Image: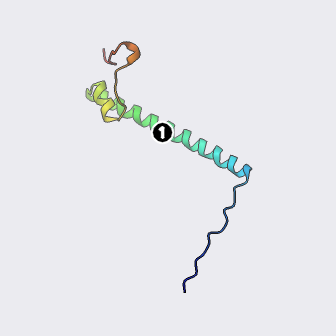
Amino acid sequence: MTRIRRPAPRQSLPHDLVLLITRKADIMVRRFEDEVLNQLVRDAMRALERGATVEEIARELGLGSAVHPAAGGQHDRP
């Protein structure tokens, strides 16, 4: 006969440990965000140097539309 094991009761984390984990996660997110931003800028600069348009770069990098609604629908290029 198979015995059914009950899961052990969950223990909650001490508040101080939760704060430390949260702070560490925040630091990691900021570092990752900086790395991603730098990579996107490098990729965009290389694409501009290749002669790509703003729309092509935005599409390739998954940035959405390069049209600014606040600028009356004007594109980023001259």
In the picture of the structure, the residue carrying the numbered disc 1 is 35
Q: Is residue 24 above or below residue 5?
A: above
- Rendered residue at 51%/41% (across/down): 32
Q: Residue pushed farthest front? A: 1
Q: Is residue 7 above or below residue 46?
A: below
In front here: 48 or 71? 71
- Identify the image quadrant of the C terminus: top left
Specify the color scheme.
rainbow
- Rendered residue at 58%/81% (across/down): 3
In front here: 77 or 39? 77
Q: Residue pushed farthest top? A: 72
Q: Position of residue 13 (x, y in %)?
A: 70, 55
So how many labels did they put on this image? 1
Q: Is residue 44 above or below residue 32?
A: above
Left or right: residue 13 versus residue 4 is right
In front here: 67 or 3? 3
Left or right: residue 41 versus residue 25 is left
Q: Residue pushed farthest left? A: 51
Left or right: residue 57 versus residue 40 is left
Q: Position of residue 44 (x, y in %)?
A: 35, 30
In front here: 77 or 7? 7
Label 1's element? helix
Q: Is residue 72 above or below residue 9?
A: above
Q: Position of residue 26 (x, y in %)?
A: 60, 42
Picture quarter containing residue 70?
A: top left
- Rendered residue at 33%/16% (across/down): 73
- Identify the image quadrant of the N terminus: bottom right
> Given the image, on which type of amino acid does mark 1 rest?
Glu
Picture quarter containing residue 49?
A: top left
